[in-house]
Image (cartoon, grey):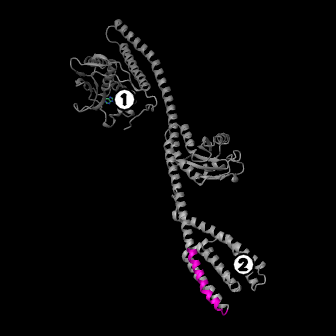
């Protein structure tokens, strides 16, 4: 921002201007008097002695007057004034000497004193009257012996000159004082006006800054920029956005007090988008430096349409944000007035505020586009997962059903265990495993789509459910020792099937991740208004740093070798957590400190679980669908 005013300098400039004007007026007066004197000399007293010298003196005075404007353009008015005074003084002195008979010619000294008084004030006026009296006395004495009358007159005339000096000086003091006071007043008024103007501009600009950031929508932001810039800048203002791929500037929005111009300009620029380096706008795009041009400087080809649109001037400034070039703000006007100085400065100030707003809007629209793309990709993947899982379930159900049928028939046909029966059991168990995997995939796709699991709570006995799940696991893994610690009954209001799914998963994991056998203990108990279930094994355990991550989707704490060893997709705990979350509870993993090895997985839910509706993420970022593995 430029300083409010350079006060004293401004005043000096003002006074200098006044002195110049006055010096010019005095030159005209001198010229007039010289013409008058020449006419009187030539017409009234052509025979007077010394006429040629007087004419030369008058001619010099006239020539000096004509020279004054030229001198004023090159030198300070004060210096020109001093020399003018000396010239006048010399002219009058020569005239007094040459035209000794014209006794009243000394009165011309009065004019010189008046000039001095007007130019330099009281002091200079008194001094000049003394100097001129001395000159006059010297000239009179040089001319020769004086008669007594002339001698008597001499002090009167000297008194007249000095008296005139004092009066003229006092007169000028009043005049100059008033003029200076006026100048000061005018100066202060101008400063006040400028200050008010700047405050208004600052307020407008800060309001613009706020308005520009009000919306994250790109189109709305562009509109706000041109609408806000309108009243501050030229007849019409336009924002061009930088198209990196095309290396050109796209006209994005235009507005301004001259609505017709804004419309025509936008239409013109849309038809002729400025290429980088081309014309004024393209030039600003290439150099990122503000530029302005008036109609007379139009480059050949008229790339900015200045001639076509009959623009008087055009100003373009770059728009930056975060060190990157975003576009150009241009403003223009028709008519025959050049742009005010402040327009360029204001355009730059508007562009400074427009940059960050435009960048935010751009980032937001990029983000939304990316999110929409990712959501579409996610939906396609979920659909695929859901279709494939459904399709796989049907043949698996058939395999399970028929192998069970065959097993039953074999059992009736052949008493006792046979190889075929063992094979059929393997088929059934593997088909069951595959079905669980498929069910897990289906669950995951549902969780992703709905943002969680939906549960249907009902009253049931958790102790009984735990015992059932343990019995089932014990049947499946006859070689494992699985103990239950639970009260006789543990009434609960929750989704029994879903909790059974969690229990089964925890039990399966406990078996799977304790390959060397070892006891598994399932504990179910009441804890105030909640129930807690823990499944403890003495298996491989989980390193502390993986403990939180095991509940993430597709996460497996083991490395690739571990994955091959234990199999699985890394979905069981992810689904379990979603189920426990839906009951308003929490699930965790810990070291089995009691047994000294293995891990404990536990969950707690309220005894009267309130089913939490899954939050369907409609606009947020879709959940990450990534397979994470640990190599360590
Ligand atoms: P999966 O068992 O199919 O890999 P889960 O989601 O059930 O998937 O488990 C995720 C990971 O947590 C497992 O890969 C395993 O590394 C670890 N994990 C789960 N349960 C246990 C357990 N009882 N003991 C040790 N590690 C376990």
Tell me the crowding category of disc 1: few under 14, some 14 to 19, or many 20 or more residues within 10 angstroms, Cα based. Answer: few
When the figure is inspected, residue 473 is found, relative to residue 66, above or below; the finding is above
Spatial CA span between label 1 and label 2? 124 Å
Label 2 sits on residue: 58
Q: Of the two numbered discs 1 and 2 on the same chain, state the one appearing first in sequence.
A: 2
- Image location (x, y in percent) of residue 94: 68, 84
- Image location (x, y in percent) of residue 212: 51, 42
- Image location (x, y in percent) of residue 210: 48, 43
Instruction: Give, as a single range, the part of the protein colored magenta.
Output: 144-169
Q: Are marks 1 and 2 in contact (CB under 8 Å)?
A: no
Label 1 sits on residue: 565
Disc 2 C-beta below 8 A from ligand 1: no
Q: Residue at x 52, y 65 (%)?
A: 8
Q: Residue at x 57, y 53 (%)?
A: 342
Residue sitting nearer the eye, 260 or 178: 178
Residue sitting nearer the eye, 476 or 462: 462
């Amino acid at each position: 921002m430029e300083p409010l005013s350079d006060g004293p300098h401004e005043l000096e400039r003002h006074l200098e201007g006044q002195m110049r004007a006055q010096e010019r007026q005095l030159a005209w007066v001198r010229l007039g008097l010289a013409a008058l004197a020449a006419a009187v000399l030539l017409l009234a007293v052509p025979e007077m002695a010394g006429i040629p010298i007087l004419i030369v003196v008058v001619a010099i005075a006239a020539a000096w007057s004509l020279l004054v404007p030229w001198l004023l353009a090159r030198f300070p008015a004060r210096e020109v004034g001093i020399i003018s005074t000396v010239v006048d003084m010399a002219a009058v002195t020569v005239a007094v000497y040459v035209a000794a008979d014209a006794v009243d010619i000394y009165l011309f000294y009065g004019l010189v004193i008046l000039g001095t008084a007007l130019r330099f004030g009281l002091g200079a006026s008194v001094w000049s009257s003394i100097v001129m009296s001395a000159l006059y006395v010297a000239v009179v004495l040089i001319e020769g012996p004086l008669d007594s009358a002339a001698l008597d007159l001499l002090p009167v005339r000297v008194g007249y000159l000095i008296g005139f000096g004092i009066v003229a000086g006092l007169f000028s003091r009043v005049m100059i004082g008033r003029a200076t006071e006026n100048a000061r007043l005018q100066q202060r008024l101008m400063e006040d006006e400028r200050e008010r103007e700047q405050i208004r501009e600052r307020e407008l600009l800060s309001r613009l800054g706020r308005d520009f950031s009000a919306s994250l929508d790109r189109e709305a932001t562009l509109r706000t920029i041109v609408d806000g810039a309108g009243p501050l800048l030229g007849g019409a203002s336009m924002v061009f956005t930088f198209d990196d791929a095309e290396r050109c500037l796209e006209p994005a929005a235009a507005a301004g007090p001259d609505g017709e111009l804004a419309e025509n300009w936008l239409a013109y620029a849309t038809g002729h988008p400025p290429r980088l380096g081309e014309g004024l706008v393209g030039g600003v795009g290439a150099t990122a430096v503000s530029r302005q041009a008036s109609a007379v400087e139009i480059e050949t080809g008229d790339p900015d349409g200045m001639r076509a649109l009959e623009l008087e001037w055009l100003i373009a400034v770059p728009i930056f944000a975060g060190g990157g070039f975003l576009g150009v703000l241009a403003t223009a006007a028709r008519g025959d007035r050049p742009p005010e100085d402040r327009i360029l400065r204001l355009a730059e100030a508007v562009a400074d505020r427009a940059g960050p707003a435009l960048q935010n809007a751009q980032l937001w629209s990029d983000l939304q586009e990316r999110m929409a793309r990712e959501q579409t990709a996610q939906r396609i993947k979920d659909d695929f997962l859901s279709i494939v899982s459904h399709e796989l379930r049907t043949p698996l159900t058939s395999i399970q059903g028929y192998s069970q049928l065959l097993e039953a028939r074999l059992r009736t046909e052949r008493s006792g265990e046979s190889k075929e029966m063992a094979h059929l059991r393997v088929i059934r168990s593997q088909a069951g495993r595959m079905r669980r995997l498929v069910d897990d995939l289906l669950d995951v796709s549902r969780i992703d789509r709905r943002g969680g699991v939906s549960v249907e709570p009902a009253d049931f006995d958790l102790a009984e459910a735990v015992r059932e799940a343990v019995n089932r696991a014990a049947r499946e893994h006859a070689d494992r020792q699985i103990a239950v610690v639970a009260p006789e009954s543990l009434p609960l209001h929750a989704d029994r099937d879903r909790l059974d799914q969690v229990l089964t998963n925890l039990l399966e994991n406990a078996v799977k991740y304790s390959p060397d056998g070892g006891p598994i203990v399932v504990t179910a108990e009441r804890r105030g208004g909640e129930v807690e279930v823990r499944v403890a094994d003495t298996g491989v355990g989980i390193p502390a740093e993986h403990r939180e991550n095991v509940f993430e989707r597709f996460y497996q704490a083991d490395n690739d070798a571990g994955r091959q060893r234990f199999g699985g997709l890394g979905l069981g705990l992810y689904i379990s957590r979603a189920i426990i979350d839906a009951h308003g509870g929490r699930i965790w993993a810990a070291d089995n400190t009691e047994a000294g090895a293995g891990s404990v997985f536990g969950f707690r839910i309220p005894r009267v679980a309130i089913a939490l509706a899954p939050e369907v993420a409609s606009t947020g970022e879709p959940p990450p669908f990534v397979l994470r593995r640990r190599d360590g």
